[in-house]
Image: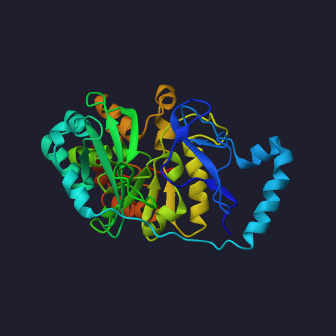
Amino acid sequence: MPYKYSLDSSSKKHLCPNCEKKRFVIYKNNLTNEFLPSEVGRCDREQSCGYHYTPMQYFDDNQHLKSNYENRNTTLQKHIPKIIKETSHIDFAVVKKSLKYYKLNNFVSYLNTVFKNEIVTQLCKQFKIGTSKYWNGATVFWQIDEANKVRSGKVMQYNKNTGKRTKNITWVHSILKLKDFNLKQCLYGLHQINVFPNKLIAIVESEKTAIIMTGLGLLHGIMKDYLWLATGSLNMLKIENLQALKNRNIVLYPDLGSNINTKGTPYEQWKQKSDLYKKEHFKITISKLLEHQATNSQRQNGEDIADFVISELKNKKLAKPEIQLSKEQANFDKLVKSNPNLTKFAEIFGLGFIKN
């Protein structure tokens, strides 16, 4: 049964009452399609703001309004059928037009400071990184599903020297002003799952992290057996977005962060979801690598797995890849028993498994 209230699923953002950034999503009445008051919602800046005022809290604070809403909803529920809108898509020709002008693309310029040119070229091709003129040096992160259909493209602007994202963010369908566009997001990089059917799935938060971790695998062989995908944000790890991965082994790599919004750290939030999805027969686990090895400074800065690995490389400490899947661990242990030298080899080249 659908929830009575849910966060607006469109790409529209409002000013947050707390941080005053245009990253706020308002709750919507699913029976009437009406929005709740403008302060009832959640800020997308989970770690740096954390504002979240739920419908339950709102009605607890405004008991005199609750009965009116309940009565109206009960009446409407009898007459309004559940309407399931079809997922909208963008023509692939639009994607192809964006796959150029990389010298003007700030994010690609940053990648060139981290990797060799041939690796950057491969990353652009593999992830179909696009260029947009909507903002100076803007990048398009196309969300293409497992059927190779384009859900939309997230347009963001990066600093080409630091690789840090600016406040500018929008969607291709919004720029093109496509009428009645029904965005249903998918995991970033999902179009690759049929190209790499045997790779383990690693899921991170940001598109940038997925791309950089793939590049580190190509350059250094670090975690090269993973296929790196991204949710796009902390809250987009949803069961509907994992359906295409039902038969794949999945490892989650949440960002570091503090518990500033009472919902727990990113690790705790994704651990809770991981446990829930296991009950739905997903082969999913969550990495403890950052939780166990990150410094307090890295935690306070909200760093991710890519930040951590690059830091380890700079300090000449190759991070070992972590795969917490018992079947793969057992197979590796059998090989070690037959050839003890494999342990030393694995430690040197980062090919082993880390036990909990």
Farthest residue toward the top? Answer: 297
Say left or right for 277 vs 312: right
Farthest residue toward the left? Answer: 118
Residue under the image location 44 percent in, 52 percent down: 231
Give how far across and how far down residue 131 sits, in percent. 24, 45
Which quadrant would residue 331 be assigned to in this image? bottom left
Residue under the image location 39 percent in, 50 percent down: 174
Quick check: can you spot residue 94? yes
How is the model colour-coded?
rainbow
Q: Is residue 181 above or below residue 350?
A: below
Say left or right for 285 vs 198: right
Residue under the image location 50 percent in, 47 percent down: 12
Give how far across and how far down residue 270 sits, in percent. 55, 50
Say left or right for 222 vs 100: right
Give how far across and how far down residue 246 sits, in percent. 47, 69
Say left or right for 88 vs 225: right
Give how far across and how far down residue 106 sits, in percent. 25, 35
Quick check: can you spot residue 347? no
Taking depth in this image into account, of 296 and 6 the one nearest to the observer is: 6
Taking depth in this image into account, of 62 and 282 the one nearest to the observer is: 62
